[in-house]
């Protein structure tokens, strides 16, 4: 009886605590909607840095960018038929497209943030495709920030220089939509290493680099982070073509490649958990955007999201997966191979065998903005009153 009464008191206490304690949602933890986005990553997020810095090395020829006409910039800056996840994020927040770091000298407007992602970038401090790996991007950001602070242009300052309404750096989100994918592709597809070796060395090296990047940004004042894991690369037409004779999983993707991406995701999740503990207490919030599971949802239920082809590249030059590494999309070396796209890019997941279509990026952005595949729970659309009106426009 006494025990039961105690239990009742405990229950009552618990209930009253639950009433006063905010539910463990981001909103209850003092979440503030980001006023700017500072983006880092590789070709899944690069909106022009590599094209500007290395024009001959990575020129993107038509049919890249055929699905969307960028009014303010040349259209061939993105590794897709149109917009990337970061573009949809800027649209939803009502921000202009985030200027690129490489265009910083051209007087672009960085009040809403900037993009430091480079196609081919690894997380680990190595050069495989481009030297601008993740932590060099962070260095670029720090240089950019100190110059911006010198000139003061980062204040959207309607009331004059002494009354900034917000600060694009301290009130911004630090966003790595995806990194690590190149580390893993180089290990598997170029160096031909078996998956246990990749999981034992490349996965921890990449995750350690992400941890360093977050810590460095945090030390410079960053408090809000959105970090993506790697998508299931074993479902890419490039990997399906190269590893055609390996075991496939239930989704007909290369099993041991996807296992590497899952290992990366698990290691990243643990690293973010550690960082929440070590950096917590000063308002730092770190959200995981789960590219892997979001993509698996699309591969599992493609029709639900308007996709009819999950296995072949929309733009390629034949073969079972419409991918040929000798004549990739936009190839100009030999007449016509790789120079045409499928008629309906919007129904394809893969654009060029390695990168995704605008339609795929749009759906992934919608998931994240609507709070799906985000941990801890956060519904940005609801919290920040986001709109999706312009997601289907063509220019
Ligand atoms: C990570 O980068 C370091 C520094 O360049 C290099 O020594 C190491 O071999 C790299 N690790 C992997 C797995 O590529
Ligand atoms: C797959 O093909 C490659 C290249 O032809 C060959 O070296 C390898 O032994 C094959 N593996 C299996 C499991 O058949
Ligand atoms: C992804 O989905 C798997 C299977 O449902 C789950 O075990 C895993 O925790 C999910 N990953 C994340 C980061 O939530």
Image (cartoon, rainbow, N blue to C red):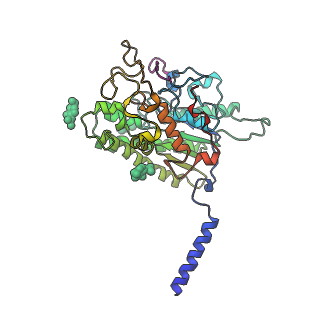
* Residue in the foreground of this view, choosing between 113 and 18: 18
Residue 57 painted magenta: yes
At which x and y percent is residue 94? 65, 36
Residue shown at the point (41%, 33%) measured from the top left: 126
Look at the image and give the residue range highlighted in magenta.
53-66
At a point 31% along the width and 44% down the height, the residue shown is 250
The outermost residue toward the bottom is: 1
Q: Is residue 46 above or below residue 260?
A: above
Residue 112 percent coordinates (x, y): 64, 35
Query: Could you tell me how many numbered marks the image carries?
Result: 0
Please, what is the dominant secondary structure of the magenta stretch? loop
Question: Horizontal and vertical percent for residue 310?
Answer: 38, 35
Q: Position of residue 357 (x, y in %)?
A: 46, 31
Image height check: is 128 above or below 255? above
Using the rendered view, name the quadrant where residue 174 is placed. Answer: top right
Foreground pick, 40 / 217? 40
Residue at point 31% right, 39% down?
252
Residue at the far top in the pictured view: 335
Residue 158 to residue 5: above or below = above
């Amino acid at each position: 009886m006494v025990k039961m009464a105690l239990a009742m008191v405990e229950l009552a206490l618990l209930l009253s605590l639950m009433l006063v304690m905010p539910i463990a949602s981001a909103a209850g933890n003092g979440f503030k909607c980001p006023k700017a986005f500072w983006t880092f990553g590789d070709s899944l997020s690069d909106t022009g840095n590599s094209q500007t810095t290395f024009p001959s090395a990575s020129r993107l020829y038509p049919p890249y960018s055929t699905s969307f006409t960028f009014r303010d910039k040349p259209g061939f800056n993105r590794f897709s038929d149109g917009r990337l996840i970061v573009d949809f994020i800027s649209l939803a927040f009502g921000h202009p497209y985030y200027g690129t770091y490489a265009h910083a000298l051209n007087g672009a407007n960085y009040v809403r943030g900037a993009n430091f992602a480079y196609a081919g970038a690894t997380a680990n401090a190595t050069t495989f495709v481009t030297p601008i790996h993740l932590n060099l991007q962070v260095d670029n950001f720090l240089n950019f920030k100190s110059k911006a602070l010198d000139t003061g242009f980062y204040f959207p300052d309607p009331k004059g220089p002494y009354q900034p309404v917000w600060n694009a750096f301290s009130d911004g989100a630090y966003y790595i939509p995806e990194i690590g994918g190149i580390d893993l592709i180089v290990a598997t597809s170029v160096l031909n290493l078996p998956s246990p070796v990749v999981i034992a060395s490349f996965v921890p090296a990449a995750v350690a680099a992400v941890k360093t990047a977050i810590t460095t940004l945090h030390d410079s004042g960053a408090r809000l982070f959105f970090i993506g894991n790697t998508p299931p690369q074993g479902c890419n037409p490039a990997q399906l073509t190269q590893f055609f004779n390996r075991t496939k999983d239930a989704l007909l993707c290369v099993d041991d490649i996807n296992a590497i991406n899952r290992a990366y995701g698990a290691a990243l999740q643990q690293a973010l958990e550690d960082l929440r503990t070590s950096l917590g207490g000063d308002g730092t919030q770190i959200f995981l955007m789960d590219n892997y599971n979001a993509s698996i949802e699309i591969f599992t239920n493609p029709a639900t999201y308007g996709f009819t082809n999950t296995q072949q590249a929309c733009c390629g030059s034949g073969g079972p997966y419409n991918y040929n590494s000798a004549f990739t999309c936009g190839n100009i070396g030999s007449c016509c191979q790789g120079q045409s796209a499928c008629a309906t890019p919007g129904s394809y997941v893969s654009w060029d065998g390695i990168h995704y279509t605008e339609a795929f990026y749009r759906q992934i952005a919608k998931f994240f903005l609507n709070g799906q595949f985000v941990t801890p729970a956060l519904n940005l659309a609801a919290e920040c009153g986001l709109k999706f009106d312009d997601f289907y426009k063509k220019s």
